[in-house]
Structure formats: structure tokens, C-alpha cells
Amino acid sequence: MDLVGTDKDMSFYISRETSKLWKRFCAEATTEINLLAENWKYILGGLICQYIHGLAARGVHYFHRPGPILQDVGFYLLPELGQDRAYISETVFTTIFLSFVLWTFHPFIFKTKKIYTVLIWCRVLAFLVGCQFLRILTFYSTQLPGPNYHCREGSKLATLPPPENILQVLLIVPRGVLYGCGDLIFSSHMIFSLVFVRTYQKYGTRRFIKQCAWLAVIAQSLLIIASRKHYTVDVVVAWYTVNLVVFFIDKTLPELPDRTSALLLPVTKDSKSKEENHKLLNGNSGDPAEWRPRTQINGKIVEDGKTVHEAVINGV
């Protein structure tokens, strides 16, 4: 009998928690959809710029000509991994990339939240666009012989035949991304990794994860050189260029609202629904008087959730 009662209690607990999780997800999705409706131009513009960057990287491959590998201090100091172990650097990069993407969507699941997914990606895309614009200028200024295995003399992939139609120019395939040549200074992998880690450094909450993230970026820098995917100068230039670009762009952008001090909820007429949404979004409890204090945003004092919502959106 005790086991039956325990099973029923466990089933009830799981059902209740699942219901709470689903309600929290729906409330968060509604909030993010409202933000996306106001900021879709920034997201779309950032994605279009990612496509343009891909086109530019493929375009420079047409100009690439293989030649002797340049003298490089990193190549002397770091032993060559070889083609069989070149995947190691890609594995580290993929781990950093996927971990950051999952973290930006954690507000849909966890109670303790500090960011809004749409707003954080608006910021990240602004950083990426600024860095990639400079990257396009640099690798089109001077084409260096690629040190990667498929870019060396004798490789059929080192050069691309002239395109036969416009579709070959505009279509970006995964193979072309993995086996590109000529887009060297500076490393695109380092752009993404440094932007992601710097963003988590500012908005993340786990100190241990921040330390691990920086160690992962340092390890990736060394692995990129050891894999002969880039010259050492490509990695070194990325370290100071990306950090400077992020620093200056970050100063020009409005600061993200802190979820612990600002209330951002869908506008509803039912005050009970507002209270329930707030508890789902921010993990707080208590009566409405506890979660409707006066909040100061951009120098203005506001009280109701609708005004805060508009103030946060206009601040983006």
C-alpha cells in the first residue's frame, strides 16, 4: 500500500511540475514573441549580414592561389596535429557554439533568468557584424597562401573554377564552408568564440563556467594553429580586434534590462494572470504589491507592466 501511495504522489508531483514548466514556457514564449515583433529588423539584418559574410568568404576562394607556407612562429612552437586529428579544434569550437546558443534559450526553462533571448541575440549579432565587416576588408586586401591541408599546392580544392552561373556564386553549401581558402586574416572561429564568451562573461551568472569558457577559447586558439587552419597572425589579430570591436559597440548600445528589476510581461486585463505570469517568468512569489514596485528605466519612473514593456522595447 505504501508503494502504491508513493507512486501516486510521484505521478502527481511530476504532473504538477510538468504543468508549471509548460506554463512557464508559454509565458516566456509570449514575452519573446512581443520582443521579436519589435526587433525583427535587427535580427533579420544580422542574419543577412551572416549570409553576406559567407558569400565574401566563398568569393575570395576564387582568387586564392596555393603557394609555399609562410614562416610562422606558431608552426615552429606547436607540433602539427595532422589531418587525422584536425577535427579536435572543430570539436572545441562546436562545443562553445552550441553551449552559448543553449544558454541564450535557458529563460524558457529555468526560473532564475537574467536575460531576454531576443535582446541578447540583437546584441550578439551587432558584435558579429562589426567584426566580420573588418574581416572582409582584411582578407580581400591581401590573399595569402592557405596553410590548411586542402589549400596547399597539389590539392584540387585549393582553387575554385570560375562559376558557370549566378547560382553557384549565391549558393553557400556546407562543403564550401569547411573547405574554404583565402579568408585568413582574421579567424572567423575566433570571432564567434570571443563574442560568445565575452557576452557570457557580462551576462552569465556562473563564475566557474566563465573560467572554463576562457580556457576553452585559449585552447581553441592553440588548436587552430596546431591544425594549420590559420597562421598565428590570424589568431593574434582576432584576439585584440574582436575585443576592441565588442568594447566600443557595447558602449554605444543601450544596456539590457535586468529581469530582477524590470517587469516585462504581455499586456493582459486580468490582474490575476499578470501575477501568475510574473511568478512563472521571474520565479517570484507573494502578493502583487511585492512585484509591482516603481521601477526606474532610462531616467523615467514607471509602475504598470505595460509602461515597463514599452520602455524596455524602446531602449533596444
Image (cartoon, grey):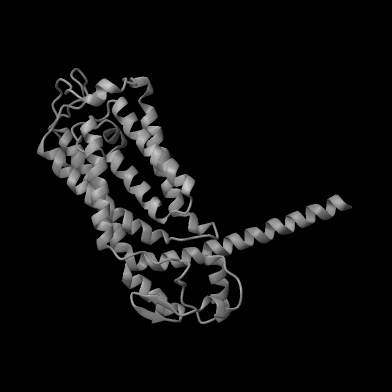
Question: How many numbered discs?
Answer: 0
Horizontally, is 126 left or right of 261 in the view?
left
Relative depth, front residue between 220 and 32: 220
For the point 25% across and 20% down, the residue is: 76
Residue 259: where, in percent of width, then height? 46, 66
Horizontally, is 277 left or right of 164 in the view?
right
Where residue 56 sits, quadrant-wise, is top left
* Above or below 153: residue 301: below
For the point 22% across and 35% down, the residue is: 234
Residue 197: where, in percent of width, then height? 37, 47
Horizontally, is 141 left or right of 119 in the view?
left
Residue 23: where, in percent of width, then height? 57, 64
Relative depth, front residue between 214 and 257: 214
Instruction: Farthest residue to the right: give it.
Output: 1
Where residue 161 sits, quadrant-wise, is top left
- Is there any visible trace of residue 168 in the rendered image? no
Instruction: Farthest residue to the top: give it.
Output: 154
For the point 19% across and 17% down, the residue is: 154
* Above or below 165: residue 254: below
* Above or below 102: residue 258: below
Relative depth, front residue between 154 and 295: 295
Residue 88: where, in percent of width, then height? 39, 28
Instruction: Work out which quarter of the rendered image holds the C terminus and state it.
Output: bottom left
- Is there any visible trace of residue 154 in the rendered image? yes
Instruction: Farthest residue to the left: give it.
Output: 141
For the point 28% across and 36% down, the residue is: 177
